[in-house]
Amino acid sequence: MTAQWIDNRKSLMFFSGRSHPELAEEVAKELKVPIGTQVARSFANGESYVRFEDSVRGSDAFVLQSFPAPLNEWLMEQLLMIDALKRGSAKRITAILPFYPYARQDKKHRGREPISARLVADLFKTAGADRIITVDLHADQVQGFFNGPVDHMHARGTLSEYIKQNYSLDDLAVVSPDAGRVRVAEKWADGFGGKPLAFIHKTRDPLVPNQVTSNTVVGDVAGRTCVVLDDMIDTGGTIAGAVRLLHESGAKEVVVAATHGIFSAPAAERLSSCGVKEVIVTNTLPIPAEKRFPGLTVLSIAPLLARTIQEVFENGSVTSLFDGIA
Ligand code: R5P
């Protein structure tokens, strides 16, 4: 152990907003560092307040926040934490967003709309974030919205390892729930040793949020264990529609793997009644008891986040974390 290493260790400071304390505790435990102490509260009119209890001067600060509802409040809290770190002379500030808020609004679908995902990136830059760590962005190009390094991590290793351990790969097919995610599904299919690929032709009404119609399955899924992949499950409409269609097309069973379990109502109801065998997600977002349902498995993203923080802090290689991922 060198003196240089000891000096570096001293400067890593890990902080968490109030949205997902369980995940913060897991990450801190993996890193073997304490969560920095702070005062955080909301005023009666909805304004947020934060203050760090200890000096942050010269620190390499990592600030974790998740984004369940009320998402805008948590976003503001994390921005205030970053502003306080900047004004408290932290040496480098990394915002950790296991789930990037507003990522689905990454382009103008119609005239006179905002590009909200870009605005979020600008807000983090303005607050003082030097870099961002995030997991499975809705679209890869969101990385480029932030003017600085973005470590875009993937939950594929965590999710696919679970599937390998719990399902036979013999008659497996990988299914994308829409045409936009076929490239991702292709990587999964390759990782499983070259499995057949299918996708669902899905349409949505641009005037009605979360309203989707699953039209038809493209590809042969008859007699197969179908693994449907998505970045997120919100109201469950996309997944429930896909599961029904796959069964109608002769699938033997349907398993779903998604990184972010938002589970806005009526997701729990839809997913419990659509005939899916298992829904596997990670804990990038908190999943309280009322959002859980039979057949739900939640895997921890904390080891991946902790390893990423470690690599960033030690100027190691974040890319190396993907080596050997099936
Ligand atoms: C869409 O492009 C996304 O990848 C998800 O499939 C979608 O946002 C999930 O929303 P919901 O669960 O409400 O259908």
Image (cartoon, rainbow, N blue to C red):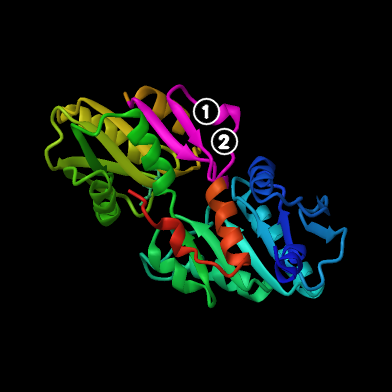
Q: Are marks 1 and 2 in contact (CB under 8 Å)?
A: yes
Question: Is residue 295 rendered magenta in the image?
Answer: yes
Label 1 secondary element:
loop
Mark 2 neighbour class, 10 Å CA radius: few under 14, some 14 to 19, many 20 or more: some
Residue 266 visible in image: no
Residue 10 visible in image: yes
> Residue visible at 43% across and 54% down?
154
Q: Amino acid at mark 2?
A: Ile
Query: Residue 292 shows which numbered tag?
Result: 1
Label 2 secondary element:
loop
Q: Is residue 274 left or right of residue 34?
A: left
Instruction: Report the Cα–Cα distance between label 1 and label 2.
Output: 7 Å
Quadrant of the image occupied by residue 79: bottom right
Q: Residue furthest front?
A: 1
Q: Amino acid at mark 1?
A: Arg
Compared with 214, 75 (above or below) is: below
Q: Earlier in the sequence, mark 1 or mark 2?
A: 2
Q: Is residue 235 left or right of residue 185?
A: right
Mark 2 highlights which residue?
287
Asked if the beta carbon under badge 1 is closer than 8 A to the nearest atom of ligand 1, the reply is no
Q: Which residues are magenta?
A: 276-302
229 and 120: which one is in front?
229
46 and 172: which one is in front?
172
Compared with 103, 253 (above or below) is: above
Compared with 288, 97 (above or below) is: below
> Residue visible at 44% across and 39% down?
235
